[in-house]
Amino acid sequence: MRRGHLRVLLGAAPGVGKTYEMLEEGRRLAAEGRDVVIAIVETHGRAATAAQAEGLETLPRRAVEHRGVALDEMDLDAVLDRRPALALVDELAHTNAPGSRHDKRWLDVDALLSAGIDVITTLNVQHIASLNGVVEKITGVVQRETVPDAVVRAADQIEVVDLAPQSLRDRLSAGSVYPAERIDAALSNYFRLGNLTALRELALLWLADEVDSALQRYRVEQGIEGSWQARERVVVALTGGPEGETLLRRGARIAARSAGGELLAVHVSTQDGLRASTPGALDAQRALVEQLGGSYHQVVGDDVATALVDFARSVNASQLVIGVSRRGRLGAALTGPGIGATVIRASGDIDVHIVNHARAGGRFALPRLTGPALSAKRRILGFVTALVGGPLISLLLLSTGSDDSITTDVLAYQLLVVIVALIGGIWPAVFAAVLSGVTLDFLFIAPLYTVTISDPVHAIALVLYVIIAMLVSIVVDQAARRARAARRASAEAELLATVAGSVLRGESAVPALISRAREAFGLAGVRLITADGQVIATDGEPVRDDRSTTVPVGADRAMLELHGRDLDASERRLLDVVVAQLAAALERTDLAETAAEAGALAETDQVRTALLSAVSHDLRRPLASAVAALGGLRAAGDQLSDSDRRELIETADESLATLSLLVTDLLDVSRVQAGVLAVSLAPVDAADVVIAALDELGLGPDEVELALDPDLPALRADGVLLQRVLVNVLANADRYSPAGTRVRIATSRLSGTAEIRVIDHGPGIAAERRDDMFAPFQRLGDTDNTAGLGLGLALSRGFAEGMGGTLTPEDTPGGGLTMVIALPVEGGDAAGADQSAVSVASAIRRRTP
């Protein structure tokens, strides 16, 4: 019997339109003559979804009673008896009621497929088993209903029903997804904009991986060996050497250049196990691969280059990153071009990146001006050329020469002498001249096979041989010295450019200069210390005081200690440049610290000026009102009526209460500025703080609706400061809420953070003005006698940030403002208990006009 086809409609979150899309497709297929039935559909009270189900045959559900509750489940037997061509089955991850034939609905779907019935079903990405943990980290919600990945991947067709996160939130706010009483909670928890964006990306990436797997299967089935580079897949070859970290970071940057890029690291082990590698380095590099978001692989092969290219083709790689060989030039000349050249030849259409690294020829160092102009390698090569070239030329001339070809013989040996002089310099050239002269006399000048100089002309010829060799070698030696001087000048220019650039880069200038100086002068260690012995920067081996050279920096501002070897005069000149730049960098650091201190003082002056303005203006009104009321009572005496006396007393009481509140806020700000307002973090019950704040404001059930999570863990906060934050926020919400509406306080947990949301349905605040509401001494146009100094929200945000949390405004669905207080839960990533008021002060200073 033919197995049915499975089509899965995958969504990032509830409400994106999966069920609607399934029903719409069912209606289309039914209109084309297909036998379509609705096995089960959950409309969740959505009118548009229910309307789509009209006109389609709907099979009756099976009623199940569990613990006194009536449950409706899909009637699998009814669907099998009906045997439609296509069944519409909603919510693939659903858990069936106890007593059903199968525990999970996806098992029911498998039974329908086995019976030859095609199925269209819906699924949210959070219900895919392999993504369950990732979704929990994103949303803080544990999904208990999951579907194995193999079940979903076995589907004949998978489609993503996509909807932009903000569009989904708008649909939710409009009441198209959940009923009105669930909207606020949904928007503030699972349906946060960041959550929806992450879930959407997760769904698209999971489908992209599935498409990639399908592409791989197709290539295998069709015998296609070439790479189809549908997306960037970067393979980094690891040898187990120290250069692996450099290669991995370069590969990660290449992969990050395109959306959906993938990083794979591979280490090739030979079958005999003799390939050198460092297990510790490989373990560290494997951890780095995972940190960079890639995957680590290990393959075995006799030929490393072939195994590497085969792996890259097997994963459909588009880029291959390998390191420059650590062998020297002589090693490369003796052992061949190496793995890199073989990989390039065999890679085909895979791009190969050969990355330089610190182990490929050593670090930057200044060429030496002392010593022989030509290297020992070149001198040895000159002697080898003379020893090998002489016999070869002799054999050639003996086999082709004649008695009349002595001139050609002489010129041939002369050419050998010039070549040796060009290669090895003066001593190999003199050796070649003497050797060729003796050979000429022994083989080509009568009497043959004897070394005698019977004619003075022959002696002169030998001297000329030596003179010519010396002249050519002198020219070669001078050219080599000039080339070395040019390289030295270029290296010095590079060093000076690096020094200047390090100073311009600012904060990292001093460590960069220290590191560059050690490398350039070939020192074992360099250290910069202050006059009192405090280490500012160090590089290389620990500096030994008994073997170090000390150079003052910046008029004894610091001391530069050099360890390893003595510097010559030319290097001392460059060292003076480095020292001067170090002094400039230290001076720049001092100036930056001074500027920061001056900026803090300027900010403090701004707050102090605003405080003085508030004292002179805002305190005057309630103080004047209280004085006037008390003066009226004193002057009138018994002549006042009871109502007038009561009114004056109420005025004085209100003004003094306002004055007390203003003075309290001013004292809080002054303590914060002085850094003496300590933040004491401890476990705090959010419900207790909410109730205390309501009691302080005198708000009851008629003004406030509570929706507190009973399972919310303790917050890590300062209970006194948190209560001040809640009082300020609640007072504003109550003040601006329209008559007949209640302020709503809701608590919830999102991963390691707890949120207290204060929701009002007042006029709200435009997005462009929300920063102004947190500025000290700003009241957004409110000037009544009870409005205060405008410090409430500034202090509230400062207190929240001082406790390691945040205070942010959001729009309330349907109009209004929602203030969200987010704080870490106890045991989460909370700040230390010794957190001081410095962060609170900086939060207020940043917002001072």
Image (cartoon, rainbow, N blue to C red):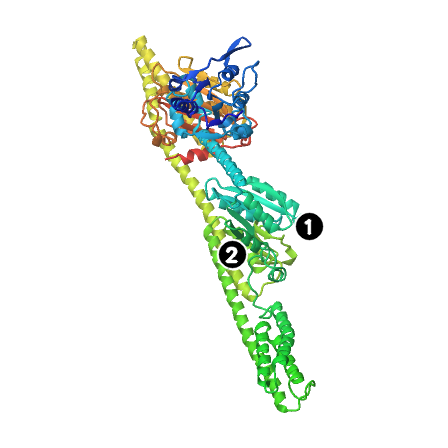
Q: Nearer the viewer, mark 1 or mark 2?
A: 1
- Viewer can see residue 609: yes
Q: Nearer the viewer, residue 313 or 268?
A: 313
Residue type of the residue flagged with mark 1: Leu
Residue 250 x/y as whole percent: 52, 48
Quadrant including the C terminus = top left
Left or right of 587 on screen, residue 636: left
The vertical placement of 493 against 457, above or below, is: above
The vertical placement of 286 against 32, above or below, is: below
Which residue in the rendered view is the most extreme toward the bottom?
A: 455
Instruction: Locate residue 621: give its quadrant.
Output: top left
Left or right of 305 on screen, residue 604: left
Residue 208 badge: none
Residue type of the residue flagged with mark 2: Ala
Q: Badge 2 is on which residue?
A: 555
CA neighbours of label 2 inside 10 A, class few (<14), some (14 to 19), many (20+): few
Quadrant including the N terminus = top right
For the point 54% across and 8% down, the residue is 68
The vertical placement of 619 against 269, above or below, is: above
- Viewer can see residue 680: no
Query: What secondary structure is found at the residue carrying circle 2?
Result: loop
Which residue in the rendered view is the most extreme toward the front?
A: 1
Q: Nearer the viewer, residue 636 or 136?
A: 136
Instruction: Locate residue 696: give its quadrant.
Output: top left
For the point 60% across and 72% down, the residue is 424
Q: Badge 1 is on which residue?
A: 274
Left or right of 689 on screen, residue 452: right
Residue 15 x/y as whole percent: 42, 24
Residue 259 x/y as whole percent: 46, 40
